[in-house]
Amino acid sequence: MIPIVILFAALIIAGIIWSALAAKKRREELSTLAARLNLRFSEADNEAIAGRFEFLDALAQGSNRYAFNVLAGQYQNNEVLVFDFHYETHSTDSKGNQQTNHHYFSFFILKLPQRFPELRITKEGFLSKIAQAFGYDDIDFESAEFSRKFCVRSKDKKFAYDVCNAQMMEFFLGNPDLSIEVERDSLALAFDSTLSAAEIEMNLQRLLEIRARLPEYLFTKV
């Protein structure tokens, strides 16, 4: 029995060490990426970012919210902010024991030159279908395929139609993993997990592709 306990403990310690080394390697890769893209990099926990952007739905979840591994600055003439995000949720098991669950994901924000109403484009799924059943309808578009695969919600339907033009819908159909939120002067791109440095660079480009497909007349309105 004792050797099994020792083996189990050794496996746990090895897992902790491997996780720490992987996190250190990723931080170094993110720092190198930031330097190559002329962005600032900070690995420190940053609660101010969480508070500043808590109007974005993805950043308003749970408690103990903070950003870390932050890349910030001008990228191809756009002000961008890319970071890992942490929040906690709590659950109670059948015995009354409370558990703390930690959640981590990568998040991208591009600053827009004008403020806009809230708009969300997310993958159509089980939860969105339940929401529709309770009256939270999404917006339908001429493209039946786009309407079937994506859930678009905004109180301003005119703005939603302006954003989801033919070029934008085609782009999303070619990139079905994307979920975005527009609110105030932020265009945000969210993921379900933390991304590698290579994935972050690739998704920065996809964020710019989305920005390029926003019609210019949106930015000339008084």
Image: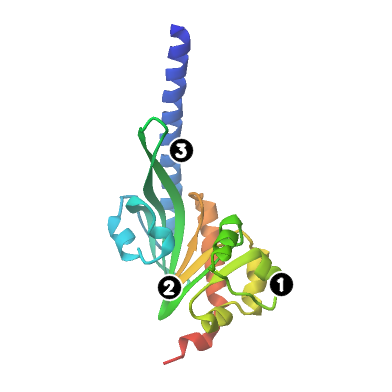
Residue at coordinates 60% horizontally, 61% vertically from top-left?
Answer: 129
Q: Nearer the viewer, residue 221 or 209?
A: 221
Identified by mark 3, the residue type is: Ala
Distance in Å between CA atoms under marks 3 and 2: 34 Å
Mark 2 residue type: Glu
Distance from Cα at disc 1 to Cα at disc 3: 43 Å
Relative image position of residue 202 (x, y in whole percent): 56, 59
Residue placed furthest toward the front:
134
Q: Say above or below: 78 vs 85.
A: below
Please give the residue where the numbered disc 1 appears in the rendered image. Answer: 144
Element type at mark 3: helix
Please identify the residue farthest to the bottom as the structure is shown.
Answer: 222
Q: Mark 2 points at which residue?
A: 183
Q: Residues within 10 Å of mark 1 (few under 14, many from 20)?
A: few
Give the residue number, with chain letter if any, for mark 3: 22
Marker disc for residue 79: none
